[in-house]
């Protein structure tokens, strides 16, 4: 890791310190017994008397039932009394250090997370923050992995632990990265600085987690084929999307405005967006024809069915506004256009949230 190292509780050092204290006190107790053994009216006769006196002094109870009567015996008692302040300080300091270590470890993500079907984002920047805002708005949980300690504080300031889990880790420390529950994630977003760094990292992480779904954004759209060959499921060119949207604003601004709204999530009931819903066993349209689902959804929920996704030979196939008779089957995804109010009605009908499901 770079920049910051967590201050861990040093168990070995604490054990050594306690051992040294025990040895020193044991030697002083033996000396105290030796000094007191020939004194008239002695009160410290046995070893247990000396230990009892030590405990009374260290705890500042001071019953007075056992105490040294010789001059040098009292000097040892004075050492016990003064050292009690240091012992208390040592114990309190060790407890505080231990608690701070636990709290810091939790904040840095070392305790792990139980998120499932979530998004794992590797790397943090302003673009990533914008993506997270949309994901949270759509009801998704996100695990952010960053190697910059300062980013942890920024993320924790904006999002709560139920929405975003943060992990402070070197990106190549795959054993530590597993604390993000990456194996149960729906998709992994590689959000590193440049395309070359992303490609190298994809090759490395695919060796450790070969069966996960990966998505990257590219500065150079010409590299799409290279990343797909490396095993990336979705490659998105930021410049390509921006240029298409800008051109659309120039010659069909209303369509562009609607398109920009559709690729986000609906903040208000009157706003529209597109969603995909997994067809499960209890879905009311399982086994129905596409045309029937189209008319029923429009009538009951003011939702427009615009496509269906089927899996063929392990590959996902999007069929947009299909012609002919297509039957909706379990495991398909329905692609729907709806406003915020329609989404609420649809969730009551389907009893599940949008997006990819494991």
Image (spheres, rainbow, N blue to C red):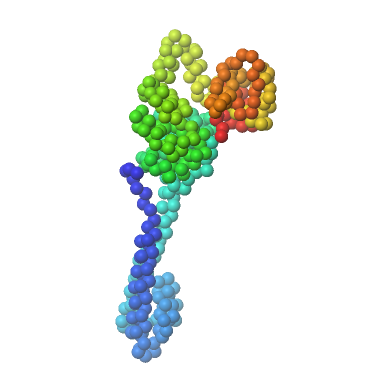
* Relative side of 224 to 329, left or right: left
The residue nearer to you, when weighing 91 against 327, is 327
Depicted 231 relative to depicted 112: above or below: above
| Residue at x 49%, y 34% (from the top left corner) | 212
Q: Quadrant of the N terminus?
A: top left
Specify the quadrant of the image occupied by residue 270: top right
Residue 211 drawn at (x, y percent): 49, 35
Residue most extreme to the top: 251
Left or right: where does residue 268 sit relative to residue 215? Answer: right
From where the camera sits, is residue 5 visible? yes
Residue 119 position, x and y percent, is 49, 34
Q: For the point 61% across and 18% down, which residue is it?
A: 304
* Outermost residue, front side: 313
What's the residue at 61%, 14% (across, down)? 323
> How many marks on residues?
0
Q: Residue 182 in the image: x percent, y percent?
A: 48, 39
Given residues 178 and 162, the one toward you in this image is 178
Residue 321: give x, y in percent of width and height.
Answer: 59, 16
Tell which of 267 and 11 is nearer to you.
11
Q: Residue at x 40, y 41 (%)?
A: 152
Which of the image's four quarters has the C terminus?
top right
Left/right placement of residue 346 relative to residue 241 reads: right
Q: Quadrant of residue 282?
A: top right
Q: Is residue 339 above or below residue 247?
A: below
């Amino acid at each position: 890791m770079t920049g910051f190292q967590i201050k861990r509780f040093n168990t070995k050092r604490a054990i050594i310190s306690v051992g040294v204290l025990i040895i020193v006190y044991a030697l002083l107790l033996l000396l105290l017994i030796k000094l007191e053994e020939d004194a008239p009216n002695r009160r410290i006769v046995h070893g247990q008397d000396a230990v009892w006196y030590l405990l009374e002094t260290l705890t500042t109870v001071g019953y007075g039932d056992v105490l040294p009567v010789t001059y040098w015996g009292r000097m040892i008692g004075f050492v016990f009394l003064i050292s009690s302040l240091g012992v208390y300080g040592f114990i309190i300091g060790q407890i505080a250090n231990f608690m701070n270590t636990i709290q810091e470890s939790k904040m840095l993500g070392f305790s792990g997370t139980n998120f499932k079907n979530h998004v794992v984002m590797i790397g943090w920047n302003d673009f990533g923050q914008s993506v997270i805002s949309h994901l949270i708005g759509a009801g998704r949980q996100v695990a952010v992995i960053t190697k910059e300690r300062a980013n942890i504080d920024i993320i924790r300031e904006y999002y709560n632990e139920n929405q975003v889990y943060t992990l402070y880790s070197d990106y190549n420390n795959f054993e530590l990265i597993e604390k993000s529950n990456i194996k149960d994630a729906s998709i992994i977003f590689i959000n590193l600085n440049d395309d070359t760094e992303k490609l190298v990292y994809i090759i490395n992480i695919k060796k450790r987690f070969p069966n996960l779904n990966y998505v990257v954004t590219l500065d150079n759209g010409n590299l799409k084929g290279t990343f797909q060959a490396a095993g990336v499921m979705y490659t998105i060119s930021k410049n390509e999307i921006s240029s298409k949207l800008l051109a659309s604003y120039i010659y069909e601004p209303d369509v562009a405005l609607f398109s920009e709204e559709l690729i986000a999530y609906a903040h208000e009931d009157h706003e529209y967006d597109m969603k995909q819903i997994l067809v499960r066993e209890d879905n009311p349209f399982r086994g129905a024809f596409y045309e029937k689902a189209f008319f029923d959804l429009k009538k009951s929920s003011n939702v427009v069915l615009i496509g269906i996704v089927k899996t063929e030979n392990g590959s996902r196939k999007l069929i947009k506004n299909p012609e002919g008779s297509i039957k909706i089957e379990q495991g398909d995804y329905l692609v729907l256009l709806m406003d915020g109010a329609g989404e609420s009605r649809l969730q009551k009908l389907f009893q599940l949230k949008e997006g990819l499901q494991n």
